[in-house]
Amino acid sequence: MVVAILTIIIIIVGITLSVTLHEAGHTFTAKAFGVPVSEFMVGFGPTLFSKKIGETEYGFKPILLGGYSKILGMFPPTNPNWKDKGPFRNIIKDVRAESAKSMEGYDSNRAFYWLSTPKKVLVMAGGTLTNLLLGFIFFALAFCTIGAYQPSTTLQSVAQCLDGSDKCSESAMTPAAQAGLKKGDEIIEINGQKMVSWNQISEVVSNSGGKELEIFYRVLNQDQSANNVAAKTTVIRVQSSSIKKAVVKPVLNNGRYIIGVTSQAVRQPGSLLDAAQITWQAFSGTVSMVTTLPYQTYKAIESIFTQEKRGGNTVLSLVGVGQIAVDQTTATNDNLSRIASLLSLLGSLNIALFVLNLIPLLPLDGGHVVNSLYEGAKRAIARIRGKKRPAPSDLSRSMPLAYFVYGLLIFCGVALILVDILNPIKL
């Protein structure tokens, strides 16, 4: 129970930290380019504590599931040439009016909409790129400092008989058992070739064609002596190792050559390249999931009624993420494995935030980036044609679509929470 509670607390803090740093990526790039930022808040709900530093009010709110920043002048004011029509014209006018009101007391030239295209892109991509960096850092901490269990060149077990039993005639024994290999022996060389990984050993055996292999292996010897001191027995172990040679002839079993041994898994730290590869794998998998989010949500909702088992490759809410975290940390007593699992999960969450915000639709960061690039293209064409710089794009016209996308994301989030409660994932 204690482990489960601590896991949930760590996940909540990790999510809050990730979203807060995402907003910090927007905030401090905007401030670096002179754009005013009126608020930077950690959490949601009523403000518990805040302090104004310079132009920005920094504060904390009780619902620690994210945060937000308020960048001023996101939308240009009303232009006399703009003709507002249609059912959403009042919404569009209100958005412009609110943006104009937020700039009261500030130099209008500092508004976000006046920034150059590269600066706009940097501000809006700053949060998303922060999540990408955080994802890589979390994966690097998990796999480069703690590491993961990998097969080693040390033997975990040596099968006695080819049929899996413990007793049999010598002719029915596995090649490794016949050669005298035992649990704990470390294979260091085969046919003059140094063995540095279990995959290398498996490949050599599989490709042997049944020919004899000359194996050199290290045996760990333990000499024990006991002394009775004050009616207590103290055991002194002196360990040494010796190198032995065995000639083993692999046998064909289920279509592949074997000698009858398994590897001992040991924790091995990886490299930064490994962390980069894992980050890429997380990115690729998340892209596939996010691009089909409505369909994945529909399938998840359907599973409530069909009670179809949900596997690991399914879309989840924060509730589902918490369930996985608790399952992983309570399934082992190895604290390092628990920490690595949580770090990997936080890495995956940050990659998910990165990918989600790349969607080129408002109110997501990708929508703002696309609009900035569109404005940049218009300015470049005007410059080439020798015309004056065009006015900022009327981004407020996209707000009805933004509200629809926002509503769709809320619907998917709430629906997935219900699914994760009614039909939780089973790994």
Image (cartoon, rainbow, N blue to C red):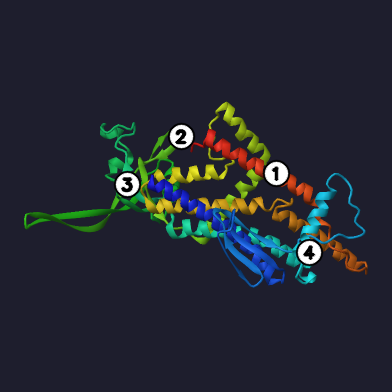
Q: Position of residue 108 (x, y in %)?
A: 79, 69
Q: Position of residue 144 (x, y in %)?
A: 47, 59
Q: Which residue is mark 2?
A: 255
Mark 1 Cα-neighbour bin, 10 Å: few <14, some 14–19, many ≥20: few
The correct choice, above or below, for 297 with respect to 400 in the image is above
Residue beneath the point at 28% across and 40% down: 178
Out of 258 and 268, give the one closest to the viewer: 268
At label 3, the amino acid type is Val
**N-term-proximal mark, 1 vs 3:** 3
Residue beneath the point at 60% across and 60% down: 41
Out of 414 and 341, give the one closest to the viewer: 414
Residue beneath the point at 57% across and 36% down: 419
**N-term-proximal mark, 2 vs 3:** 3
**N-term-proximal mark, 1 vs 4:** 4
At label 2, the amino acid type is Gly
Residue beneath the point at 87% across and 64% down: 391
Splitting the image into 4 quarters, where does residue 59 fall? bottom right
Out of 224 and 258, give the one closest to the viewer: 224
Quarter that holds the N terminus: top left
Instruction: Tell me the tag on residue 247.
Output: 3
Q: Which residue is mark 1?
A: 407
Could you tell me if residue 148 is visible in this image?
no
Q: Which residue is mark 4?
A: 113
Q: Nearer the viewer, mark 2 or mark 1?
A: 1
Q: Position of residue 12 (x, y in %)?
A: 51, 52
Identify the secondary structure beneath mark 3: strand
